[in-house]
Image (cartoon, grey):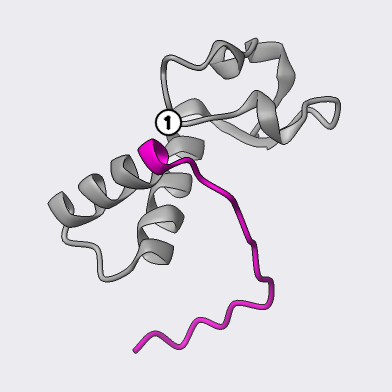
Amino acid sequence: MSSLTRGERLQIMLTRKELEALDTWRFAARMPSRASAIRELLKRGLAAEGFATADSNLKSGDFGVEVSEPKRVRAASSFAKVK
C-alpha cells in the first residue's frame, strides 16, 4: 500500500462510452482500480501536452473522452504551460 495520502475527492460523470473506454484501457494496462487508471491517464495527458492548468473560461462540457464530441476541440492557448 502506498504511503501517499489524497486529501481531495474529485467526482466526475462519464457517459457509458467514456466509461467503457476507461475500463478497456484500465484492463489492458492492468491498473488495479478505475481511480488509479484515471490518475495515470491524467498524469500522462498532462505530461504529454506539457500543460498544468486549464483556462478558467472553459466549462467541463468543453472536455470529453469521445472523439466524436464537437466540443472536444480546444486551442493550445486555452492552457497554461508548465515551466
Q: Residue at x 32, y 69 (%)?
A: 33
State the image quarter where residue 82 is shown. top right
The quadrant of the rendering that contains the C terminus is top right
Q: Amino acid at mark 1?
A: Ala
The answer to whether residue 75 is above or below residue 48 is above
Secondary structure of residue under mark 1: helix
Q: Residue at x 68, y 78 (%)?
A: 7
Q: Position of residue 27 (x, y in %)?
A: 17, 56
Q: Residue at x 25, y 54 (%)?
A: 26
Q: Residue at x 77, y 30 (%)?
A: 59
Q: Nearer the viewer, residue 23 or 50?
A: 23
**Label 1 crowd (10 A; few <14 / some 14-19 / many >=20):** few
State the image quarter where residue 10 is shown. bottom right
The quadrant of the rendering that contains the N terminus is bottom left
Which residue is identified by label 1?
48
The answer to whether residue 19 is above or below residue 62 is below
37 left or right of 52?
A: left
Q: Position of residue 69 (x, y in %)?
A: 51, 17
Residue 7 among magenta residues? yes
52 left or right of 70?
A: right
Q: Which residues are magenta?
A: 1-18
Q: Main secondary structure of the magenta part?
A: loop
Q: Position of residue 2 (x, y in %)?
A: 39, 85
The answer to whether residue 29 is above or below residue 21 is below
State the image quarter where residue 81 is shown. top right
Q: Nearer the viewer, residue 28 or 13?
A: 13
The answer to whether residue 26 is above or below residue 76 is below
Q: Residue furthest right?
A: 57
Q: Residue furthest front?
A: 16
Q: Position of residue 74 (x, y in %)?
A: 62, 14
